[in-house]
Image (cartoon, grey):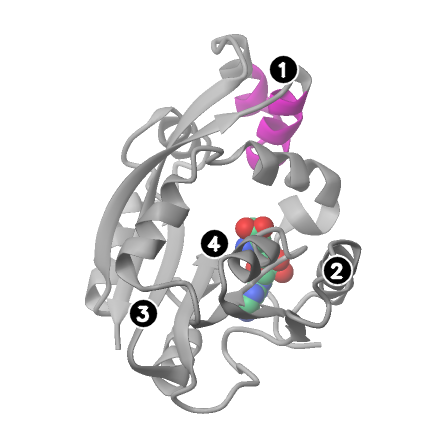
Amino acid sequence: MAEAIRSPNIWDTPDVYELENLASDRAGVIESAMAGLHRIDGARLLDIGCGAGFHLPGFARRGAQVTGIEPHRPLVAAARKRLATQGLSDQVEVLEAGAQDLPVADASVDIAHSRWAYFFGAGCEAGLAELDRVMRPGGVAMLIDNDATRSTFGAWFRGAYPAYDPVAVQRFWKRQGFSALPLTIQWTFDTRADLEAVVRIELPPEAADRLLAGHEGTQVDYGITLWHRTY
Ligand SMILES: C[S@@+](CC[C@H](N)C(=O)[O-])C[C@H]1O[C@@H](n2cnc3c(N)ncnc32)[C@H](O)[C@@H]1O
């Protein structure tokens, strides 16, 4: 298997992670921002760390030529199943690989998208070197990450993981030549039970209990950064 960094939320509880994806950014803030950075229609798009392939059908329907990259074999299977269910198997391929060893030709990619891209962060520079190799001149890498300096979820994340230094994360991306596009998305759940289940896979149990007790309803605002770089 390709070298994968363990991702407990989606590896251990893929059904709850699906609820998280369904609740995230129903307004399409991220998709609009992406379209402002590079035309999606006709683009060769890699979704790196695509997990169970949640975002692949949307990109394909907007006219991209899409390849999902995912190192964790059960998720590769889940992504292929999703595509088959939606009649998209002929249009979208999913390859078992990691960011540090992309099975695609040099200078062949217009958009590299990676959502919750922790596996590109400090210590994972091999993946960033692969982007240098595979991106076409004029192509854009778009890496979507938490911005724990702001928003309700950002404050929850900072409080729950005090060793996480959001300012150091920002410095890292800037050193790698990426520019920040700050965005705020919403989690909008259908039920309170869904919200609680998701908070419990994202935060340690004691923090989850305490934060849920102080937060009403089914919505949470969530600060993110779309880190982007044109090659
Ligand atoms: C938090 S999940 C996000 C999945 C997907 N992007 C989504 O938004 O639904 C992170 C994903 O990165 C994958 N991953 C872990 N290490 C990786 C690596 N070295 N290269 C590429 N993907 C990796 C995990 O297996 C997991 O599927």
Counting other residues with Cα less than 10 Å from the Cα at mark 1, is it few (<14), some (14-19), or many (20 or more)?
few
Numbered tag placed on residue 115 in the rendering: 4
Horizontal side of residue 116 vs 163, given as left or right: right
Q: Nearer the viewer, mark 3 or mark 2?
A: 2
Disc 3 from disc 2: Cα separation: 28 Å
Disc 3 from disc 1: Cα separation: 37 Å
On whether ligand 1 comes within 8 Å of the CB at mark 4, the answer is yes
Classify 223 as above or below 213: below
Classify 139 as above or below 47: below
Kindly indicate whether the residue at mark 2 contacts the one at mark 3 (C-beta within 8 angstroms): no
Question: Foreground residue, 120 or 91?
Answer: 91
Q: Which residue is mark 3?
A: 140
Numbered tag placed on residue 87 in the rendering: 2
- Secondary structure found at label 3: strand
- Secondary structure found at label 1: helix
Counting other residues with Cα less than 10 Å from the Cα at mark 2, is it few (<14), some (14-19), or many (20 or more)?
few
Question: Foreground residue, 196 or 231?
Answer: 231
Type of amino acid under label 1: Arg
State the residue at coordinates (63%, 57%): 51
